[in-house]
Amino acid sequence: MSTSAVVIGAGVSGLTTAVCLAESGMDVRVDTDRPPGATTSAAAGAMWDPYLAEPSDLVERWSRETLSELTALSADTETGIRLVEGTQESRVSRDMPVWGSLVGARMCLPAELRQGFVAGWRYRAPLVDMPRYLRYLVGRLEQAGGSMRRHRYGTLDEALTQASVVVNCSGAEARFLVDDASVEAVRGQLVVVENPGIRTFFCDDTPGAEDLTYIYPHGDVVVLGGTAEPGAWELRPDEGEAREIIRRCAAVEPSLAGARVIGQRVGLRPVRSRVRLEGEWHEDTLLLHNYGHGGAGLTLSWGCAREVTERVRGKLPSPH
């Protein structure tokens, strides 16, 4: 076998896992059917934001570990990570999320809320330019001696012949690669526009809202979102959806009305009732699964990658 470990998938979960394995001293190759810039991760907003996910105790730990790492990386401008202040707001009364204490969140005063919102919390957290961040991770992997190969696996059995350790970070494609019908693709679309001067982020966190609405400033551009369409696999942007995204965001932030559109991105969130992080032996090959993060791939990335690395190095059967 030519490598010690093969990681399937070059999204944020796959690349972060590969970096952790390579920096632990392993010989690592990432096999991917599409370059990092064409993955779902590259189409993300993206911000550290713990979505509701199970198992909750592990998700809390993975989120906390990732927050610490992303915060440290924000000191390096090459990462595309910045600590940005902003608000999550709700159109119905609700308490601040339990993770608010991790980022020093405080409840908004009534005068701080946008029109139509009755509750919210202000905090500072990592905001990530994902295409740039993915390029940083590729560079870090290569610096640690790792490599990448364009390859699409038709079956998992083929991958198991490639290395003594195989890590499955195939995202929504795990539905087919490992025949996991519990993985559902939830299509997300966003729009990138010229920044009219926005410096703080906004996210509509109204429980049960039919549409996603978020505004993430990245220097000269602003990422506007979004959509969440279960079971939709279409990767081409929908112009009608794009117009509706801009309309919703401009209703919250009027300066966005008429902003020049730079581009659109579409990705498939790998949604599952529980994140799958577990290992199994196939003769002499250790197979670990690391997928099903839904919209929280970035938020859980470093915590899950370190979990995988610890299990590989110690052959641990349990995360506890």
Image (cartoon, grey):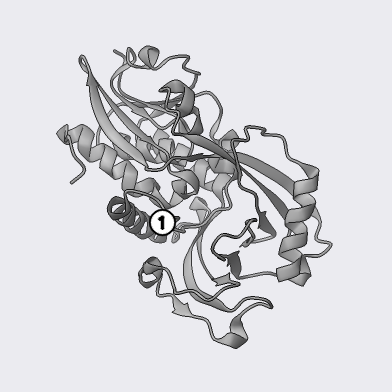
- In this view, the residue in front, 154 or 217, is 154
Q: Residue 250: x, y in percent?
A: 76, 65
Residue at 39% over, 12% down: 158
Q: Is residue 149 visible?
A: yes
Residue at image mark 1: 70
The part of the image, by quadrant, that contains residue 157 is top left
Q: Is residue 260 left or right of residue 293?
A: right
Q: Residue 264: x, y in percent?
A: 71, 45
Q: In the structure shown, which secondary structural element does the residue marked by tag 1 occupy?
A: helix
Mark 1 closeness class: few <14, some 14–19, many ≥20 residues within 10 Å = many
Where 83 falls versus 167 (above or below)? below
Residue at 45% over, 28% down: 181
The part of the image, by quadrant, that contains residue 14 is top left
- In this view, the residue in front, 147 or 164, is 164
- In this view, the residue in front, 48 or 182, is 182
Q: Is residue 196 visible?
A: no
Where 207 falls versus 308 (above or below)? below
Residue at 44% over, 61% down: 75
- Amino acid type indicated by mark 1: Leu
Image quarter in which the N terminus is found: top left
Where 91 falls versus 55 (above or below)? below
